[in-house]
Image (cartoon, rainbow, N blue to C red):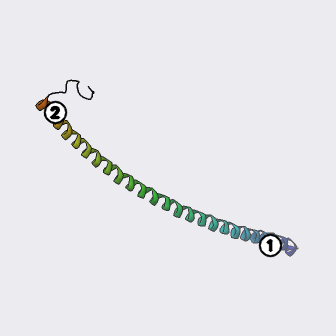
Amino acid sequence: VISGIVLPIVLVVWRRGTEAAKWQGELGSTVRGLQHQLDERKEEDEALQQGLRERRQAYDVCREEIRASLAEVKSDLRIVRHDVARLVEKNGLPPSGPGKEE
């Protein structure tokens, strides 16, 4: 009588254990697949971050070159203004005024 009750319970427990092991294997496979995708995305993200850092560095270099060029232009403009002021002071303005044709 007891074996008639115990045997079906053992079979049910064994079957559920087998199903649980199957699900555990499938979940493990899914987790490994997701981890692989995550690792790939991390690599892609790092590559993008590196590209962004390189672009920022190039931008900074260009910005500094532009600033240096602008400083040179401003310096040259001061010199030209000074020279023009000296010439006007020395020779006076032309009768028609600056920038006008006679």
On the rendered structure, is 71 left or right of 3? left
Find the residue positioned furthest to the bottom: 3
Give the residue displayed 49% in from the left and 62% down from the top.
47
- Check the image and report above or below for 34 versus 100: below
The percent position of residue 94, horizontal first and vertical second, equals 19, 27
Tell which tag, 2 or 1, sits nearer the viewer: 2
Question: Residue 72 versus residue 29: which sits nearer the camera?
Answer: 72
Question: Residue 7 versus residue 33: which sits nearer the camera?
Answer: 33
The percent position of residue 26, horizontal first and vertical second, equals 70, 68
Per the image, the residue denoted by label 2 is 85
The percent position of residue 81, horizontal first and vertical second, equals 20, 36
> Cα distance, mark 2 to mark 1?
109 Å
Question: Which amino acid does the dot numbered 2 rest on?
Answer: Ala
**Residue 10's mark?**
1
Give the residue displayed 24% in from the left and 41% down from the top.
74
- Check the image and report above or below for 88 versus 25: above
Question: Residue 41 versus residue 99: which sits nearer the camera?
Answer: 99
Give the residue displayed 85% in from the left and 75% down from the top.
3
Give the residue displayed 42% in from the left and 55% down from the top.
55
Query: Where is the N terminus found, in terms of image quarters?
Result: bottom right
- Check the image and report above or below for 10 versus 75: below
Question: Which amino acid does the dot numbered 1 rest on?
Answer: Val
